Amino acid sequence: MIFVLAGTSDARALALEIKKEGFNLLASVVTENAAVELRESGICVQVGRLTDADMVELIDTKGILAVVDASHPFAEEASKNAIKAAETAGIPYVRYERESQKFQYDKMKVVESYEEAAELALTNKGVVMLTTGSKTLQIFTEKLLGNPDIRLIARMLPRVDNMEKCEQLGLPQKNIIAIQGPFSKEFDKALYKQYGVSLMVTKESGKVGSVDEKVEAAKELGIEVILIGRPKLNYGTVYSNFIDVIAELHKKIGSTPIVSTEHHFNTGVREMDFRTEFKPLTVQPEQIEGRSFEMINEEIGEHPFTEEQYPVVQRIIHASADFELGQSVLFHPDAIQSGIRAIRSGKMVIADVQMIQSGANKARIQKFGGEIKVYISDPDVIQEAKRLNTTRAIISMRKAIKEADGGIFAIGNAPTALLELIRLIKEGEAKPGLVIGLPVGFVSAAESKEELAKLDIPFITNIGRKGGSTVTVAALNAISIMAERG
């Protein structure tokens, strides 16, 4: 069993991917509200704050084999407890950390602590808006509340305990903004204007926390910003994408000591004793991959793919263990070379879901000046989808084509995203360098791929309902490997 600290939206998404990979897991969250989504997905949940001693007890009683810490970047105490508990119990600790963001803004000052932020805010006259949550609110109220030159506004989640805390600290109701995100840049701008904000205080929580939206809104209005940098912890093993975390789990769990379990069954005639022994895995990951490719080559036999197409098919089979899926892949004649050109030219890669961005080898894309973007969870996409009563996948494609001319579209989850992209291509609004269209599902998945195969543009797709984010990542990584090798 894997113990996952899963209090954020991306942490919960990681927990689901770990479950899909076949691991049994126990997720830890602080609030009952955060537990609902996980329970609906069939994941066991531990609700409430845990000390390191609490975690050690769980590890012992539940038979935990590894700890995955996907807590918020600023959940310093939770991470310290998880690190200590894993060390005490002698099991692996793996950290999932959101990627950091960098900002260029001359009116932004970066500090290392909440206390330093409060001291700096004290030098500002006007309206100070906090977007740092309720946990550290007291640090700011002690410094700023009651200062005649400063009006302190606090934005936080609309929870009863938060309101009670504001009352205890003496923060007036008129200075409380209790609201649930995500928020768009336009919403933030409207809020800053409404309250006449002169200084906004936030923390570097990453794109998932919509920090870029808050900063861009402040930048457009000329509002000063104090950005609190992330705590500096020695996490040890750290990854910023789901695929690497799962690969590390396979590696670590495979290297655990031999565990023996005895099963005794009284049949009424005589007692039968069975012993099951789990032996450690000693081969290295690259050896496993190499042997896997050898087995694929042996089993696939004759095939219709060209020399440049086959590495894509090989990696799709490797990712899915499905020869039928691999042999159903279709290529436009220019697909491989067009994809290689797009990557080498630093063109953008657009993914329909986060899982593709997490699984793809970003370093190879970035080496040529490109990047991988996902728009489906952007606040403006969410709002527009609600306004038009349509899917976020469709709106994300409409947003993407404005920035990704000549780039690669990697679609592995949403047939509606692929159908919308096809429409935009037919109408001349989108001109991708390559479309990797491998969505999985029962509704419109096969049909969307049939429509893609009719287009005279570079594409990689397949016949039928099979597909998915994992095989889309495999195809994209195969192209990026060829681009890197030259």
Image: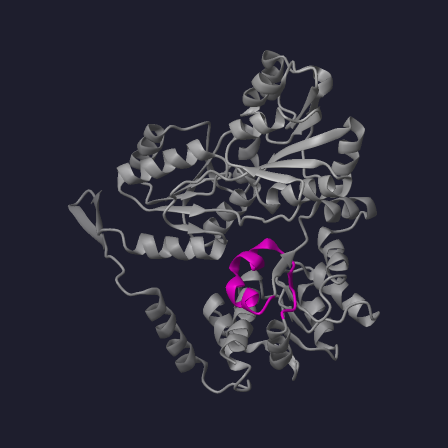
Residue at figure coordinates x 73%, y 41% from the top left:
217
Q: In the picture shown, does residue 369 fall above or below 308?
A: above
Residue at figure coordinates x 52%, y 69% from the top left:
477
Bounds of the magenta segment = 346-369
Name the outermost residue toward the right.
Answer: 427
139 or 22: nearer the eye? 139
Task: Give x and y (percent) for residue 37.
Answer: 57, 38
Tell whether position 111 is magenta. Answer: no
Task: Give x and y (percent) for residue 202.
Answer: 61, 35
Q: In the picture shown, does residue 151 fall above or below 399?
A: above
Task: Give x and y (percent) for residue 205.
Answer: 56, 41
1 or 370: nearer the eye? 370
**Quarter of the image with the N terminus in it:** top left
| Res 305 quadrant in image | bottom right
The reply to whether residue 360 is visible in this rendering is no
Task: Give x and y (percent) for residue 359.
Answer: 52, 59
Name the outermost residue toward the left.
Answer: 270
The reply to whether residue 285 is visible in this rendering is yes
| Res 342 quadrant in image | bottom right
Colour approach in the figure: one colour
| Res 156 quadrant in image | top right
**66 to the left or right of 468:** left
Q: In the picture shown, does residue 292 fall above or below 374?
A: below
